[in-house]
Image (tube, rainbow, N blue to C red):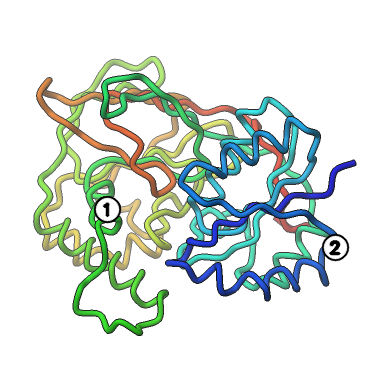
Amino acid sequence: MSLPLVIINPESAGGATREAWPKIASDLATHFGAFSREFTSYSGEGVELAANAARKGTKLIIACGGDGTVSEVANGILTSGTDAELGIMPSGTGGDFRKTIGIPVRSSDAARILRDGRTRQIDVGRVTFLKDNGEHDSRYFLGVASFGMSADVIARVKAGGPEWLPAKAPRWISGRVSFGLAMLQSAVKTQATRVMVELDEEPVRQLTVANLCIANARFFGGGMKIAPNAKLTDGKFDVISIGDLGAPRILANAPRLYLGAHLGMSEVGHTLARKLTARPLYKNQRIEFEVDGELPGHLPATFQILPKALRIRCPQDS
């Protein structure tokens, strides 16, 4: 039987994972056991490595990095068509998905869960969409897909952090400041998004939103508890729509969004759905969406839940 494989993204957390790997590897060996390892060297390689390992019979494939790395490894397992199990060894500043399933940030604690935890079968999202070249594509997601202000925030963060940060500033500070500044800029500059949305078999509706989230898990955006009631095993998305609040109200209510206390606001809608289709209101609109913190394409897109499609190693009490 193949050893468990750890797929490491050394560039996650702004490159901090590369420096942290010796300590992580030591904790894995001490608290988990023997393993093999592969380092990614380009975006998307985690998908290829995980799919190849799963097809060769590896039963446990562990993602070491942030949400993007976890998403890539999950996509590889799901693409392989096998029943390989996903494990998580956190190394990043965000860790939105690990929070939903209760994986701690300390590598020694996470390694113990990999050894002693239980296997759950969780729901997965699949999105079919248009790429920039006009071709159709699809991918799986574990956490949250969204469009509106959130996609603009991701684009701004990926474009680079504030130039005024000291060169020797810790990477975790740089990342958090970049996200906070991007959110502030997006709230001020981003206009409301006008879309046509169809939920399950309901009639198509026109919506004007600051943001719309299709959530399988609870957190996104670096710790924002956008879907506090989301369950990974109920076979449904939590669909959260935030109306056109305007910049002052968005910024004033940001703490409520992070704490998950926003569902009671009159401008926030919440419903459950197995499938959601969204397209721009106007044909000449280009509306990007983000999924698990990446920007794979733009609307029109169809988001569909796949019940209990992935095996994942979780804490015993989760």
Q: Evaluate whether residue 120 shows in this view.
A: yes
Determine the residue positioned at 38% across, 25% down. Answer: 276
Q: Distance of mark 1 from mark 2, alpha carbons?
A: 48 Å
Determine the residue positioned at 39% across, 38% down. Answer: 214
Name the quadrant containing residue 98.
bottom right
Name the residue tied to disc 1: 265
295 is higher (above) or lower (below) than 82: below
Q: Amino acid at mark 2?
A: Gly
Q: Considering depth in this image, is 43 or 276 the residue closer to the camera? A: 43
Give how far across and how far down residue 215 sits, in percent. Answer: 44, 42
Q: Residues within 10 Å of mark 1 (few under 14, many from 20)?
A: few
Give how far across and how far down residue 17 sits, in percent. Answer: 55, 67
Name the residue tied to disc 2: 33
In the drawing, does residue 215 fall left or right of residue 142? left
Could you tell which of marks 1 and 2 lies nearer the N-terminus?
2
Q: Evaluate whether residue 270 shows in this view.
A: no
Look at the image and tell me in which quarter the C terminus lies.
bottom right
Look at the image and tell me in which quarter the N terminus lies.
top right
Determine the residue positioned at 39% across, 49% down. Answer: 293
Give how far across and how far down residue 79 sits, in percent. Answer: 60, 28
In the drawing, does residue 113 fall left or right of residue 173? right
Q: Amino acid at mark 1?
A: Met
